[in-house]
Image (cartoon, rainbow, N blue to C red):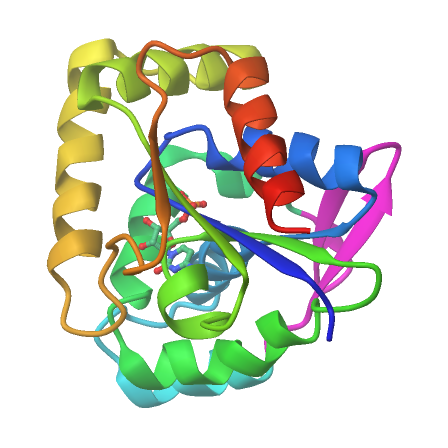
Amino acid sequence: MTPILTIDGPVSSGKGTVARRVAIRLGWHLLDSGALYRVLGYHARNQGVALDDEPALIALAQDLPVRFVEQQGNTAVILAGEDVSNIIRQESVGELASQVAVLQPVRDALLARQRVFAESPGLVADGRDMGTVVFTSAPLKIYLTASAEERARRRFEQLKEKGFGATLATLVEDIRTRDDRDMNREVAPLRPADDAVVIDSTTLTVDEVVNRILDEAAARQ
Ligand code: C5P
């Protein structure tokens, strides 16, 4: 069976960066499941589909024309031939993603697309429900978290790097709203799996988190 390592956690807990580095160190595939929800929210907006039009959203999710292309250590997200890797990182798209993500049939439609990533020699999957729903039998499940203030600060730096404007105060607010929705939704709410290793990265560097996860992985081999 393909070994799978899941990394779940709230907005800007560092999952994306950590998951990529862990995948590179292990030589495994990487699934950024949030990108799927972001692409769907973005696509819905562009197609003029209202976020409460469930049948239309389900249809979009079932036929989402998205591809993930590995390019020089990064993953390009291609939607209907257009490279949307950067644009889907905007806060407004994260908000759309979190709104479409509350719908069970939408999540069901995206399930198979996520599971195909589980290929030899292994998979690192990051998201909100990787350990609790999508890959429940993964031998190592990480729940990565950090204080809302620290996450807002990291997000601020990331957005600045990408050329998107934001203020820290708004980001703390956005993060709290999105966390609240992700943690309190009825379907696949964000929570640590019962068998997850919880890592609070508030005072840790990326390298420290990566090494801690690799140690946990080595201990299970
Ligand atoms: O991780 P990221 O911020 O890119 O995810 C965007 C949104 O997509 C999250 O706020 C969450 O609502 C949703 N999501 C989800 N399940 C996942 C990954 C993301 O519901 N596995």
Residue at left offset 66%, top offset 40% = 218
In screen coordinates, is 18 left or right of 130? right
In screen coordinates, is 74 left or right of 64? right
**Residue span colored magenta:** 64-83
Asked if 98 appears above or below 187 in the picture, the reply is: above
Residue at left offset 38%, top offset 30% = 12
Residue at left offset 78%, top offset 68% = 119
Q: Is residue 86 visible?
A: no
- Nearer to me, 208 or 86: 208
Indicate whether residue 70 is drawn in magenta.
Answer: yes
The quadrant of the picture occupied by the N terminus is bottom right
Asked if 6 appears above or below 89 in the picture, the reply is: below
In screen coordinates, is 136 left or right of 168? right
* Residue at the limit of the structure toward the right, as seen here: 72
- The x, y position of residue 17, in whole percent, is 58, 29
Asked if 183 appears above or below 176 in the picture, the reply is: below
Indicate whether residue 151 is drawn in magenta.
Answer: no
